[in-house]
Amino acid sequence: MAIEVRIPTILRQYTDGQKAVEGTGDTLADLFADLETRHSGIQARIVDAGELRRFVNVYLNDEDVRFLDGINTKLTDGDNVTILPAVAGGMV
């Protein structure tokens, strides 16, 4: 099962500069574990203590996985996963 994962600029250091990589897995947790086997260090930037990191947004086919099943969201062949760091800032 091939799943395209779009990588934000800040995490491309783990993917040798690639904007997108392929992975496999039945769930997001499985996918991130699979990515870790080829892109060492990336999983720790996305997952903490078995959950998605608070300031990382993950989308499955343009749907926020926090409104699905989070890290346990099921995947199917041909899905697209987008990882986006949360952006904060502005004037106080």
Image (cartoon, rainbow, N blue to C red):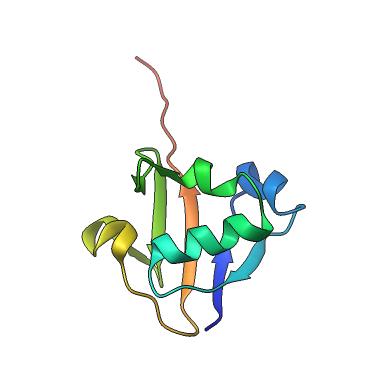
Residue 66, picture quadrant: bottom left
Q: What residue is drawn where x is 24% and y is 63%?
A: 69
Between 67 and 2, the one nearer to me in the picture: 2
Between 77 and 67, the one nearer to me in the picture: 77
Q: Is residue 5 above or below residue 11?
A: below
Question: Is 12 placed left or right of 47 in the picture?
Answer: right
Question: Is 4 placed left or right of 89 in the picture?
Answer: right
Q: What residue is drawn where x is 39% and y is 68%?
A: 62
Residue extending farthest to the top is 92
Q: What residue is drawn where x is 33% and y is 73%?
A: 74
Quadrant (top left/top right/bottom left/bottom right) for the C terminus: top left
Q: Is residue 79 above or below residue 63?
A: below
Instruction: Point out residue 18 in the picture as x, y percentages from the top left corner.
Output: 72, 59
Q: Is residue 87 above or below residue 36?
A: above
Q: What residue is drawn where x is 28% and y is 58%?
A: 70
Instruction: Point out residue 12 in the picture as x, y percentages from the top left corner.
Output: 68, 49
Q: How many marks?
A: 0
Instruction: Point out residue 63 in the picture as x, y percentages from the top left corner.
Output: 33, 66
Between 40 and 52, the one nearer to me in the picture: 40
